[in-house]
Image: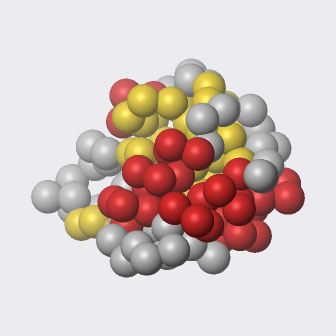
Amino acid sequence: MNRTAELGELIDTFSDPDDYMTAILEVFTESDYIPEAGNYYTFVYLAKTPKIIYDQHPLIACTSIQSWGFTGLNFHLSMPRRYTWQEVIGKVHRVYNEEIEYMKSIPYQKTILNS
């Protein structure tokens, strides 16, 4: 069974973004501490900048690696974002080219106003 089929069976009755993300992290176990530009990833993120709206469960196309972190196009927010190393919780989980459209269809975005 491929990863999207396995995930589909797990999330069939879900409606909570945290439940979706927990299942995604269980299935998408291939992970790295440092992403590679040109690849897709999902991860848990806790922003440090006050008074910004951010996605705690980003799905991104990594565009560059920097000393402070990395940049990526966040598909949930439809915009480029910066992600600092310290605010990535755990690892970044790899999403393959053939999986990205399916992952974009899962409503696991968790938009938060950082206080």
Can you say whether 22 is above or below 33 in the image? below
* Relative to 111, residue 7 above or below: above
Residue at x 24% of width, y 66% of height: 113
Q: Residue furthest right?
A: 98
As drawn, 7 above or below 62: below
Residue 80 x/y as whole percent: 60, 60
Q: Nearer the viewer, residue 65 or 35?
A: 35
- The single residue placed furthest to the left in the displayed view is 115
Q: Is residue 24 above or below residue 26?
A: below
Kindly identify the residue that appears in the image at 75 percent across and 70 percent down.
101
> Between residues 69 and 58, which one lies in front from this camera angle?
58
Is 77 or 40 nearer to us in this picture? 40
> Which residue lies at the image location 65% right of the left edge and 56% below the top edge?
6
Q: Where's the C terminus, which quadrant?
A: bottom left
Which corner quadrant of the image does residue 21 belong to?
Answer: bottom left
> Residue 66 or 56: which is nearer the viewer?
56
Report x, y in % for residue 38: 81, 44
Residue 22: in sight, yes or no? Answer: yes
Q: Residue 9 in the image: state x and y as whole percent.
A: 58, 65
Q: Position of residue 28 (x, y in %)?
A: 61, 43
Let me know if residue 58 appears in the view.
Answer: no
Give the number of callouts: 0
